[in-house]
Image (cartoon, coloured by chain):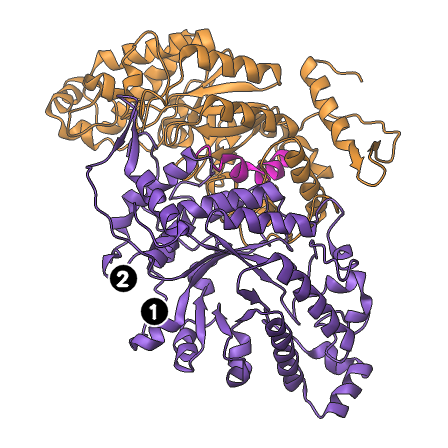
Chain colours: A orange, B purple
Amino acid sequence: MQAQTVYGALHGFQTFSQLCQFNFKSKVIEVNMAPWTIIDQPRFSYRGLLIDTSRHYLPLPVIKNVIDSMTYAKLNVLHWHIVDTQSFPLEIPSYPKLWDGAYSTSERYTAADAAEIVSYAQKRGINVLAEIDVPGHALSWGVGYPSLWPSKDCQQPLDVSNEFTFKVIDGILSDFSKIFEFKFVHLGGDEVNTSCWTTTPRISRWLKKKGMNESQAYEYFVLRAQDIALSHGYEIVNWEETFVNFGKKLNPKTIVHNWLAVGLTQQVVASGLRCIVSNQEKWYLDHLDTTWEEFYLNEPLRNITNLNQQKLVIGGEVCMWGETIDASDIEQTIWPRAAAAAERLWTPYDKLAKNPRQVTGRLAHFRCLLNQRGVAAAPLAGFGRSSPRGPGSCYVQ
Amino acid sequence: MQAQTVYGALHGFQTFSQLCQFNFKSKVIEVNMAPWTIIDQPRFSYRGLLIDTSRHYLPLPVIKNVIDSMTYAKLNVLHWHIVDTQSFPLEIPSYPKLWDGAYSTSERYTAADAAEIVSYAQKRGINVLAEIDVPGHALSWGVGYPSLWPSKDCQQPLDVSNEFTFKVIDGILSDFSKIFEFKFVHLGGDEVNTSCWTTTPRISRWLKKKGMNESQAYEYFVLRAQDIALSHGYEIVNWEETFVNFGKKLNPKTIVHNWLAVGLTQQVVASGLRCIVSNQEKWYLDHLDTTWEEFYLNEPLRNITNLNQQKLVIGGEVCMWGETIDASDIEQTIWPRAAAAAERLWTPYDKLAKNPRQVTGRLAHFRCLLNQRGVAAAPLAGFGRSSPRGPGSCYVQ
């Protein structure tokens, strides 16, 4: 095997292992139709899976199992949506009260735990994209530091008028830079409802003094958070609302993370920014009605014909939001559907199946392979409505 | 504790264990608001869960885990839909080629395995209701004995014209009677499409000779199978189509298993037969869109006011059909929704919540208890649309 990087070699071995099959009759491992000559490379450099440890805590071994399973499908970015409104499970040494916002002391990650995850992932060819989702999804920050809230009765977004807010962001990103070595950090920026800013007298006075309306304040917040991230050596990922609201002012190093509008990718790359595709109707794993066929057919470059613009779509990401799942069912909800998206992100466009029926057999085989490797991937018919595979057996393919 | 049977005592201990809670602060197990005086008994004597090992094989340890989990919710009948069209995984000593219809030799239960399941269940207060679903859901029988098929090209229902068919049923039920000690056996009888009988010349001639049309032949088949079961000491459960088609001719010991028509229970008990309720819109666990609230609100005695008729509804059963699930996700799909039905089957009518919102807290608590006991029950928001519980923690209730 020849590969330019150790990760290329790792992917090569994954492919090789998938060509091997245990023959239950002869009790021998066979390589199907050998010899093979395979020249292979990924279509997209960013092939992500989001996990969310704020809505439900995920124990360390569960995260490691998810990482293991990602390698089998050649996914290479674990987007860790660590904190959100509901809980703040991560230790931040610079601001040690932040994880007072965890659900409980049993549901927290030390900084050392996070470093362990990063190292575990890195050994498997996976980068960890850490996220803090500011200013809108950060209520839990105020449990330890209530001055981050506009007021006790109006607890988000983070107080834009308070210098302490940006000090805390700086402290978090400073601590992140010692743990999360991936070149990108995710700063969120979605779903910001600024009404607490206008209704809190202190903040409203500050806005007037600065001559800003609330959307200008939102922009000010996001851009200032970007500057802090840049100062710690990161490039930035932001959810698409930031692009929609003040696209041209985003730092050129910004990657826009598409999740709402299907056509947005075109606008992002036309503006010269990079894009990650996660449109919710197709690649949100918590949407249990979305079939694996829909996951498979979601084309990140749809309607983008300009080659330079195509290159700005660095990849895509399936999102396992945590509202409806936890350690009990995360594997079954991610797999096998994430594998359908993973094939689209890896395989050259002209080799992709036009009709997902052509994929059914190998996807069913792959989910059995996951089962054999200890991943509790569900049958293909498990979610959604149109899945053609019903009854069956992993011993009869 | 006082109880009339060892199973009553077992249920009492289950209740006691649910009153105990581990205090994460003091690290001590506490009994909430003790002392307690509890006088309790089940509302319905039959509180079932169906599993289906024909559409996907379930390894023995998985079945045992399901049995363990049933005891926590005081369910007391494991309805084992062992064989169906897709596979015949059980060894039948009298007809040793029948399990040639298994998916593979790795996906079979010996007769000793089945006895082990029965014994394991019995120690936990659970009866095992074995099912053969004749004549309509039995294609896999013909893999080992092709003469059971009308023809090679038309493989079900079982050949009504062939005495061998009834010999095989007799052999199976004879073997069953040595293993499955529950007083009931399930003979299926649903979804019978008789077209292979009329299009196969041999059978068509036989029908003419006997002066039967195909619906009379269906009736003949079901009643003859009932007689065989009775001869082995069983009372019979049959799916509702048998009642709809020839209700008055069913043996009086028949229990009609409702799965289709919501109002059917009333007709069954008005006719003097007993009934088990499993209507598919409310109590089919493979319907992933059905919320736990719908499971909770499904009242077996709806519109039945006559007390003697009420007594004929011996209980209900939630059904975990196997088309869409297997060992990878069966626990997560059964729980927590089965627990909502279990409360309705156990609790006196006047103590049941009118609004499921009153149940949310204790059901969330119960699903956490299942997690603590090693059952991978999913969060309440996991399936269906209206579940109010989203993000959360088992450590903060």
In the rendered image of this protein, does residue A104 appear above or below residue A303?
above
The quarter of the picture where residue A143 lies is top left
Q: What element carries label 2?
A: helix
Query: Between residues B144 and A282, which one lies in front from this camera angle?
Result: B144
Quickly name the residue at label 1: B301
Q: Residue at x 37, y 62 (%)?
A: B44
Asked whether, in this view, residue A145 is left or right of residue A5, the answer is left
* Whether residue A176 can be seen here: no
Query: Between residues B360 and B14, which one lies in front from this camera angle?
Result: B14
Q: Which amino acid does label 1 sit on?
A: Leu
Q: Residue at x 19, y 19 (%)?
A: A146
Q: Residue at x 42, y 55 (%)?
A: B290
Q: Is residue A343 covered in magenta?
A: yes
Residue B349: numbered disc: 2
The quarter of the picture where residue B172 lies is bottom right
In the rendered image of this protein, does residue B340 appear above or below residue B257?
above
Q: Where does the image place residue B146, in percent across and percent down from the top left?
A: 81, 66
Q: Where does the image place residue A84, in percent across and percent down from the top left?
A: 34, 27
Binning the other alpha carbons within 10 Å of mark 1 as few (below 14), some (14 to 19) or many (20 upward) gives some
Whether tag 1 and tag 2 are in contact, CB under 8 A, the answer is yes
Q: Where does the image place residue A195, in percent across and percent down from the top left?
A: 20, 33
Q: Is residue A241 covered in magenta?
A: no
The residue stretch that appears in magenta: A326-344
Asked whether, in this view, residue B362 is left or right of residue A310, the answer is left
